[in-house]
Amino acid sequence: MSAKIRYRKRTAMKDWRGLAQAGGLGIPAAEMDRIAAPLDALEETFRPLVRDLTPQMEPAISFSAEDEE
C-alpha cells in the first residue's frame, strides 16, 4: 500500500511579526521591522524556486560555506 502525500500551494507570505508574537518572543516593534524585511525578501526570492521541488528530490545533507580554491 502506498500513501500519497499532498502538498498545498501557499500563495500568501508568512506573517513574521505574527509568528514572533504568537511564539511569545517579545521582540520590540522596531527590531521586528529590521528582522522581518530580510525574511520577506528571502521568502519572495525562494518561493518561486520551491514550487518546482518534488517529494522525490533529495535535500542537501551538508553545506560548506568555505571558499573553493
Image: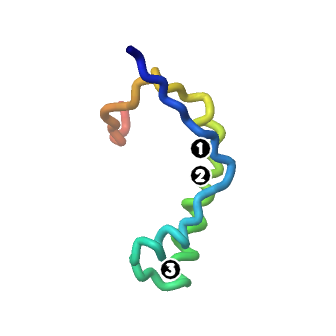
Mark 2, Cα crowd under 10 Å, few <14 / some 14-19 / many 20+, is: few
3 or 2: tag closer to the N-terminus: 3
Q: CA distance from mark 3 to mark 2?
A: 19 Å
User: Is residue 36 depicted above or below 32 in this figure?
Assistant: above
The quadrant holding residue 33 is: bottom right
Q: Which residue is mark 3?
A: 31
On the rendered structure, is 14 left or right of 65? right
Q: Amino acid at mark 3?
A: Glu
Q: Which residue is mark 1?
A: 46
Mark 3, Cα crowd under 10 Å, few <14 / some 14-19 / many 20+, is: few
Q: Which mark is residue 43?
A: 2
Pointers 1 and 2 in contact (CB under 8 A)? yes
Q: Amino acid at mark 1?
A: Phe
Q: How many marks?
A: 3
Q: CA distance from mark 1 to mark 3?
A: 23 Å
**Residue at (39, 77) in percent of width and height:** 25
